[in-house]
Image (tube, rainbow, N blue to C red):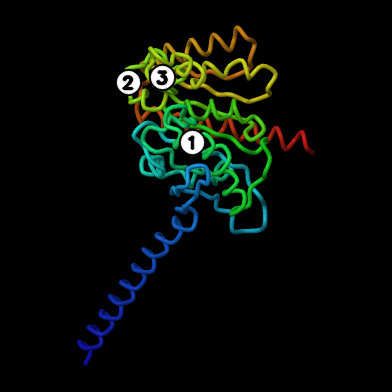
Amino acid sequence: MILFKIQTNRIYFILITLFLSIFSLNAQKTKPDSFSLTVTIPSKAMKIEHKAMVFLPENYYVGNDSFSVVYLLHGYTGYYNNWFVREPELPDYCTRYNIIIVTPEGTSNSWYINSPVDTASKYETYIAEEVPDWVDNHFRTIRKKENRAICGLSMGGHGALTIAADYQNKFGAAGSMSGVLDFRPFHEKWNLTQKLGDYNIFPDNWYKYSFVGKISKLKNSGLSLLIDCGMDDPFFEVNKEIHNDLVNQKIPHDFFIRPGGHSWDYWKNALPYHLLFFQKYFEKGENIIK
């Protein structure tokens, strides 16, 4: 009988331990799911739907506060959840900086422009207008440009700066990591002709749709800019030229140079700097309002 009790207690212990383990695993799964959401955002301009990810701070479900939003764009050949796959700490960053982060779909080679050649490709309209409007209507956001920023890597860095330049009523701050900020030196690469046309026939497109062609719009704009590029990046010289152009035109901006190349190691390291930059910008706007 004593042996039976010992065995029975052991069975109970095993069952309880198993139950607690399953409960713990479910709790771990539930928590990220509640703060890392996959949504579908339609585009009237393109008559299409795309998925996006929305990351919320831990205090989102406590109280009725509204939050600033950072739109984080992926690079060439990337996709809507590319950032999360590479950097699972995005929900933690939302809590740390008290923001919402949205990673929308830009397809593998949209370059985030309204293409003058492929007229069905209107990703500037989608990212600048349709995505923020949808997010504002489905989440508690602060619906002002002073509380909205856009950022991205490589193709997404180009998209972030050009969209912010074209939509200064929508975004108050923008950041580029290793951005392709001037298309012209790269007119034989990345299928850019599909979006801009042949360089020899349509050279104006290659300037007009590059960030370098938007710089004149930034004079007295008040747009808060951060340009970040590694010293070993193939786009470093272009980024440095953009920086010099902005300096010559007396357009305020921050310019970061650090060791590193065109890689996820660099971008993952760069992201907290950009988010801190945006947090300071958001706080400045709040203090002005107060």
For the point 21% across and 88% down, the residue is: 4
Q: CA distance from mark 2 to mark 3?
A: 20 Å
Q: For the residue marked with disc 2, what is the amino acid?
A: Lys
Q: Which residue is mark 2?
A: 189
User: Which quadrant does the C terminus fall into?
Assistant: top right
Q: Residue furthest top?
A: 248
Q: For the residue marked with disc 3, what is the amino acid?
A: Gly
Q: CA distance from mark 1 to mark 2?
A: 21 Å
Q: Which residue is mark 3?
A: 230
227 above or below 62? above
Asked whether, in this view, residue 70 is left or right of residue 147, the answer is: left
The label on residue 122 is 1
Q: CA distance from mark 1 to mark 3?
A: 30 Å
| Residue 213, quarter of picture | top right
| Residue 143 in the image, given as x and y percentages of width and height | 67, 44
Q: For the residue marked with disc 1, what is the amino acid?
A: Lys
| Residue 31 in the image, given as x and y percentages of width and height | 46, 58
Q: Nearer the viewer, mark 1 or mark 2?
A: 1
| Residue 252 in the image, given as x and y percentages of width and height | 63, 17
Q: Secondary structure at mark 1?
A: loop
